[in-house]
Amino acid sequence: MSNLLTEEQVIEITDLKKPTYQAKKLAELGYVVLGFSARGRVRALAEHPAEARVKGSTEPAVRLNLP
């Protein structure tokens, strides 16, 4: 997926090397952390929810009605 942070970007943003600490720091910063890859690397969305291009949508929010 191209909209995920690369390993280098995660290290640059968090300034940490251990994946569990990276995931915790990214979550604290507001990034959407999806979990870990099979190799133990953090998987997080590259777009921060506070970015203008994410917030700039004029369409109403989508709500899922899950059982």
Image (cartoon, rainbow, N blue to C red):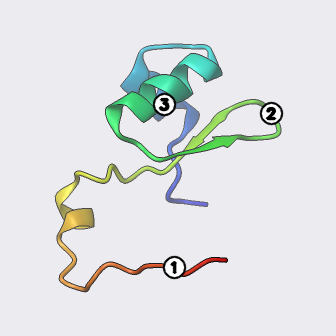
**Residue occupying the point 23% across, 51% down:** 50
Tell me the residue that label 3 is attached to.
Answer: 10
Residue 12 visible here: no
Front of the two marks 2 and 1: 1
* 5 w.r.t. 20: above or below: below
* 57 w.r.t. 34: above or below: below
| Residue 53 in the image, given as x and y percentages of width and height | 22, 65
How much space separates mark 2 and mark 1, taking CA atoms? Answer: 31 Å
Q: Are marks 3 and 2 in contact (CB under 8 Å)?
A: no
Residue 7 visible here: yes
Q: Are marks 3 and 1 in contact (CB under 8 Å)?
A: no
| Residue 49 in the image, given as x and y percentages of width and height | 31, 53
Q: Amino acid at mark 1?
A: Leu
Tell me the residue that label 2 is attached to.
Answer: 39
In this rendered view, identify the residue nearer to me: 52 or 63. Answer: 63
**Residue occupying the point 68% across, 32% down:** 41
Left or right of residue 2, residue 47 in this image: left
How much space separates mark 3 and mark 2, taking CA atoms? Answer: 15 Å
Q: Which mark is residue 20?
A: none
Q: Are marks 2 and 1 in contact (CB under 8 Å)?
A: no
Q: Secondary structure at mark 1?
A: loop
Q: Which mark is residue 64?
A: 1
Sequence-first disc among 3 and 1: 3
